[in-house]
Amino acid sequence: MSINASLNLSLQYDKSANKTVLVTGFFDLLHSGHIRFLEKASSYGKVIVSLGSDLNLIKSKGKTAICSEEERKYMLSSLKFVDSVHISHLEGPLSFETHLKRFKPDYFIINSDGDSQEKKECCVKNKVKYIVLKRDPKSNFTPRSSTKIRNVDLIPHRLDISGGFFDQVKLNSKQPGSVITCNVETLNCADRAGMSSSTRKVIHQLFGNRFPPNHSEQNLANIILAYENFNKEYISGATDAYGLVFSSVCKFKFDNGYTPYGIEKITNDKTLNWLEKHLFLKFTQPRPEGYKVYTGKEKFPIQVLKKYSQISEDTWQAIKSRDLQFLIKSVNSTCSIQEQLVDGYISEETKPEIEDLKNKGYGAKLMGAGGHGYIMCVGATKPENATSIKIRKESLSL
């Protein structure tokens, strides 16, 4: 650095050394755009952050904080561009005014997308200079926005590997049984295709594009199940609610009830990594409007249900023991017995594709209620035109 440049930098520092700057925001999902803004604000003086509270975020933007106010304060306080952070418990767009009056800064600085006449008038009233900064990403950095980051869908999908239908009281009141699900990272899936699209829409209505923090998986699953079944005569859908919320591979045990009485989870990385290598999805077509999987005349014979319950246990053991051939056999047995239980489980259009996969040595079954949609494939290699999956291993219990 030249002597002149060093002198100019020193003069700039001296000029701003005794000045103070107040900035405000929620800073939820802290990103490089926030850092750039704070960096530029710090050139005017010592930066004081008036941090919006969790409650204000909900009331002003209708969004639940992903990182709590204390967590956000902790992160901001660690930045070299920030002198101090203070949580404001006022509500509304002028929540920073309490700190404007308390600290009497020389400048109030805000990004252009937060600029408003109301904020400007507040600063004029309190005799604080109002400065608006243009969004200016650091060289070669992608422009970032908390809103855009929030809009990324992080709600997972679920695969029902075996035992589907045992969450229905009309079945589990006759014979206890388990549903085995695999929770996978978000996929770009079609609706009406056996991937719990209706339950995922309920989750989006309740929570947006990600589950709220500080809730147990059990609690969230029960909230979703209750909401989806509100005012319904027949309660169903526990496999969807629980399968979407609970991470990893789970066995949900049902016995004459709408919700599982017991839950087992596989968390062994070696087992989960093994399963990822052998589990695939293949799309056929969405279930047509008006197509009825159930006729309402299904009998669900006890001997068939007992056999199905055992197949579900076999599937669980095949996964735990990492026995590929046993798993292929169990998945094909699941498919066959679901077809016995429900006449419309495999449509005429889908049947040839499932049979072709089985003839090639794969385990294959339809997802969800059946009819059409996605086929889950199990095999040594990925079938043609199939999609690999990524198991979500992290628990929601924060």
Image (cartoon, helix red, strand yellow):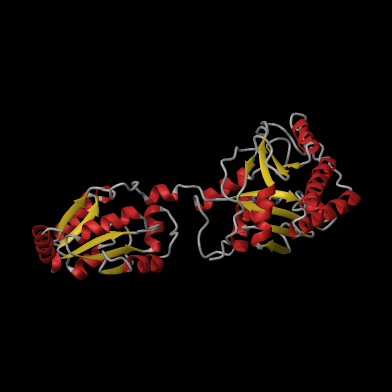
For the N terminus, the quadrant is bottom left
In the picture, measured across the screen, residue 305 lies left or right of residue 33, that is: right
**Residue 216's image quarter?**
bottom right
- Considering every residue shown, the one lying at the far right of the view is 303
User: Does 287 appear above or below 311?
Assistant: above
- Residue 296: image x %, image y %? 80, 40
Q: Residue at x 76, y 59 (%)?
A: 321
Count all numbered tags in the image, as a single digit: 0
Residue 115 placed where, x, y %?
24, 50
Q: Residue at x 61, y 56 (%)?
A: 245
- List x then y, in percent, for residue 111: 25, 51
> Who's the residue at 8% across and 58% down the image?
4
Would you say residue 395 is visible in this rendering?
yes
- Compared with residue 281, is residue 207 higher up or lower down, i.e. above or below? below
Q: Residue furthest top?
A: 349
Residue 328 is situated, as x and y percent measured from the top left of the image, at: 78, 47
Horizontal side of residue 333 vs 159, given as left or right: right
74 or 219, nearer to the observer: 74
Q: Nearer the viewer, residue 200 or 138?
A: 138
Whether residue 238 is visible, yes or no, is no
